[in-house]
Amino acid sequence: MIQFDDTLIVQIIAIVVGAIVFFWALNEYRLTRFIMQHGEEAEGRVISLIPIRDEEYPDSHEPIGYQPLIQFVTLEEVVMTVHYESSSLTQWQIDQRLMLRYLVDKPQEFRLVAHKEKVEDWLLSFMLVGAAAILFSVSAWFL
């Protein structure tokens, strides 16, 4: 029977978690780049603000921020209403106009043009963290 010591188990878990983080971020990065390069551009409008509550303080009545509900019209004249789920603390306003890009066959897949660089930076950071976890875990086997 094969026996694993605790260090090996931790290394295997770190490799698996690092790989999951890396490939998730890589997929999101590629999707963002694809939407920005090949997607259609539209002007959206914030029609509602959804409050973000702090889960640590469920009794608090004050939200810690808001996520916008954005409405835009596609090339096919279909009115789309989408929820922009972001942890950014952007100050959103009702009737705020935003430029976005979306996939023609899946308009619910969209990216805000103004947030492109910030999103790509975060995704690249996640890829680096995932790759670092894998490299450190693999290199620990050789020490």
Image (cartoon, helix red, strand yellow):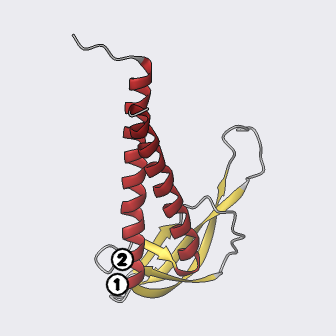
At horizontal 28% and vertical 77% (from top left) the residue drawn is: 105
Residue corresponding to mark 1: 38
At horizontal 41% and vertical 63% (from top left) the residue drawn is: 28
Q: CA distance from mark 2 to mark 1?
A: 6 Å
Tell me the number on the disc at residue 34: 2
| Residue 115 visible in the snapshot | yes
**Amino acid at circle 2:** Phe
| Above or below 8: residue 61 | below
Task: Choose top left, top right, bottom left or bottom right for residue 26.
Answer: bottom left
| Above or below 139: residue 77 | below
Whole-percent x and y of residue 91? 72, 70
| Above or below 123: residue 135 | above
Q: Are marks 2 and 1 in contact (CB under 8 Å)?
A: yes
Task: Choose top left, top right, bottom left or bottom right for residue 77.
Answer: bottom left
Task: Choose top left, top right, bottom left or bottom right for residue 76.
Answer: bottom left
Whole-percent x and y of residue 12? 37, 32
Looking at the rendered structure, the secondary structure element under dot 2 is helix
